[in-house]
Image (cartoon, rainbow, N blue to C red):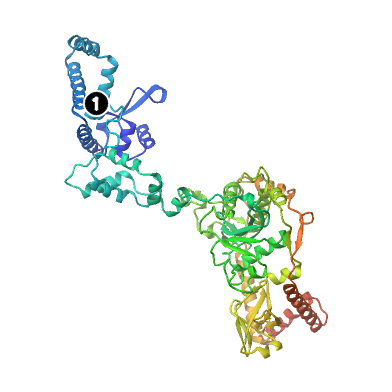
Amino acid sequence: MTWLPVSQVAELLDKTQRAVRFNVSKNQYEHRYVNGVGRGGKQLQIALESLPEEAQARYSGERETTNAEALLSLTDAQRNVVFAKQTIVLSYQDFKATYPKADKMQAFLLQYNEQHPDKPLTKRQLNHWETLYNREGVAGMIDKRGTYNKGVSSIPDDVKQVFLAYWMQEKGNRRGGGGPSIASCYRLTQMNFPDMQLPSIAAFQRLTQSIPYPAKVLARQGKKAYADKCEPFIRFDYRSICTNEVWCADNHVFDLWVKDDTGRVFRPWVVGWMDKRSRYIVGYLLIDHDPNADAVLDAFARSVFAYGIPERVLLDNGADYMVHDLFNRDFALSLANEMCLKVTNATPYNAKAKLIERFFNTLEYSYCIHLPSYFGADPQRRPERMKKACDKLRDEAMPFDEFAEYLAAVIGQYNNTVHSGDAMEGMTPCQAFEKCIVRPIRIADPVMLSMYFKRTSKLLSVGRNGVRVPELQQYFDAEELFPYQGKKVYVRYNTDDVRQVYCITEDGEFICMAESTALGSLNQELTAQNMRRLNAQKKQRRKQVREYIPDIAVPSIQQLAIENGMSLDKPDLKVIPTMQTVNSTHHRKAKVIKEAEERQEAEREQAAGGKTQRERDDAYFNFVTGGMENVSG
């Protein structure tokens, strides 16, 4: 019976050694333990005859091939030494078969050394040679010490090229980290050369080990992995910049489920802004839908109101950021041009360029991973309880409001935790933000900021019904627009109040405020339509409301994070040097718009008889309800 070590059995079966040992524990193979290197001084051996026929056939073919390859690369003197060892081992095995007593090795050594006194043989040598011969055949007799076959390959060049064409492919093999296995490529290579006796699979394993690491990464893992692991890059000198000199931004979708008040289950998004020098999160916006330009503008506005105006922004090439009126320097009235911002576009999918992507990774794996509704980035590692359809995850999903509170707490904790990044010198992001201020922080008064953070349309034509804003799908009209029929104007508007827009000439001069013609009319058809929509919405909410009890695996983590967040520090601009942003033209335009808003509000109050907004809304609702009763009557 032929006994093989675990490593050789694993190669024959194309399995891991751990899998082979597991099968042995299930008594699938005949095995034994002998003295040797292993656990407790014991080495596991498996009987070749207990393996599947395919593995036995592979062993026989590999052994014959290995013997031929091994002898072919030797010199005559080396072959003579190998054959001499083989002769001794075979003679000893024949002697054991005929010698009747138990001291077989001692008797054989005594007889052999009497016949060969010039080259005596020791018990250790004989035992070692027999073990190698039983395990590897003639190839085991070769003295592999030194450089007897260094740099020599037994694989023909044409066979090598075919094998590498199969092996160096990006196929997504889980265990190998990308690309097909050596055994499968070896079998395909054999099919390409049916009349040729190929070298053993071990020769092809050595071939793959000789290929440079960068070449294997590029071929088997792809261009991105090659760029991340092998390409040289320029290390950024963080000491060369100061606070508020560069802000970077990005969007991120969390790997967890949340639910809103209606019971809808979804993955939340966050739009974040980070100061690159200090790694401080200057602002963010948590949303329940895919990010868009309005969300980017909202998050940026929050950041600027809290910590001033940056000198440069570092963004990717996403359409949400490069929309014409935000960070596009080619549009004259864009936010970047109005606020004199320099814009740099980073390489897509490159975490080294946008530092905030590393923060999102920290957010996921240091904080969100502990939440009960976290399901992980890899579907193969997703918990069984999370493998459900979205509508069946209501009991597992975390309420959106609770997650928003938790996110605010952990971001505050991150900003006040010592950061180990380059040039941080043991400081927290909050401390670095305050310490690394070199130039006064640019700020602007609320009047100018309110103008900056209005969306701006492209040039639009004024028609008989006023101007139509495609983004809002509404017409807006005013008496002041009548002289501009047939001309082009810009339109600015607040995303949270689209009842009116601000019309501006091509030269940037303010014209007037125009109101929505649809929202300003009170005809019966529109009123009935609004009432039907309102009733449908109420019915939908009554139907979807469900009772829920948050089930958190570690109940104290949220409260702990919130309590810690309440006492965390934030940079205080009241004690930090600031510099008022001065732009007389912008300030004049913003002041004109502000005065127009105040006049508009005063006119509305006068038209409503001085009533409050609540009273006007109630009067409007009563009017709508009365209209519906008249229609039904």
Residue under pointer 1: 141
494 vs 9, nearest the viewer:
494
Q: In this view, does 117 lie above or below 35?
A: above
Task: State the residue lying farthest toward the right.
Answer: 610
x, y (%) of residue 603? 79, 82
Q: What's the residue type where badge 1 is placed?
A: Met
Helix, strand or loop at mark 1: helix
| Side (left or right) of 625 relative to 80 | right
Q: In this view, does 451 lie above or below 132?
A: below
Question: Residue at coordinates 63% horizontally, 54% vertically from top-left?
Answer: 276
Question: Residue at coordinates 57% horizontally, 67% vertically from top-left?
Answer: 322
139 vs 387, nearest the viewer:
139
Answer yes or no: is residue 175 visible.
no
Where is residue 283, by image quadrant?
A: bottom right
Question: Residue at coordinates 37% horizontally, 32% vertically from top-left?
Answer: 25
106 vs 445, nearest the viewer:
445
x, y (%) of residue 230? 45, 48
| Side (left or right) of 219 relative to 253 | left
Q: In this view, does 49 lie above or below 372?
A: above
Q: In this view, does 249 lie above or below 147?
A: below
- The 10 Å Cα crowd at callout 1, few under 14, some 14 to 19, many 20 or more, is many
Q: In which quarter of the image is the C terminus?
A: bottom right
